[in-house]
Image (tube, rainbow, N blue to C red):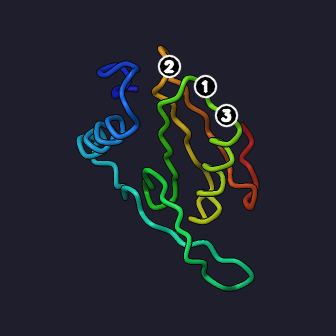
Amino acid sequence: MEVHQQLGCGFTEKVYQDAMEKELQLRKIPYGREVRMHVSYKGETLDAEFVPDFICYNNIIVELKAVQELENLHRAQTINYSKVANAKVALLINFGTESLEYERLFNPRFKQPIL
């Protein structure tokens, strides 16, 4: 929320990634940025890589977008990142609108918590 309050909407995703990294550092939140992960298919590792924007606390995927509207494709991509990383939860954050949009998505391989 702090990044959106400071910058507002209208920048590219890269700008928000850089600002988010600074904010994570300031708050001393452990993270990896653009960690390259490989997908397994039938027990074999594929050459193709998945690269989520951030992995926080070693198990939370954080995917940033700067679009007018989140689409199911963005949700599917973020959920797939959580599957590959074996992360239970993922955050999809959109900086492309006047009000910050975010969604908490769950890896279907894990039982979802009761909210």
- Compared to residue 32, the image places residue 68 above or below, namely above
User: Where residue 67 sits in the image (x, y, percent)?
Assistant: 52, 28
Which residue is painted at 34% across and 26% down in the image? Answer: 2
Q: CA distance from mark 2 to mark 3?
A: 13 Å
User: Where residue 47 sits in the image (x, y, percent)?
Assistant: 55, 77
Which residue is painted at 51% across and 59% down in the image? Answer: 59
Q: Tell me whether circle 3 and circle 1 mark residues in contact (CB < 8 Å).
A: yes
User: Where residue 31 sits in the image (x, y, percent)?
Assistant: 36, 55
Quick one: label 2 or label 3, which is nearer the N terminus?
Answer: 3
Q: Secondary structure at mark 3?
A: loop
Q: CA distance from mark 2 to mark 1?
A: 8 Å
Q: Which mark is residue 1?
A: none
Identify residue type, mark 2: Thr
Left or right: 79 in relation to 30: right
Q: Which mark is residue 97?
A: 2
Which residue is painted at 43% across and 52% down in the image? Answer: 54
Quick one: label 2 or label 1, which is nearer the N terminus?
Answer: 1
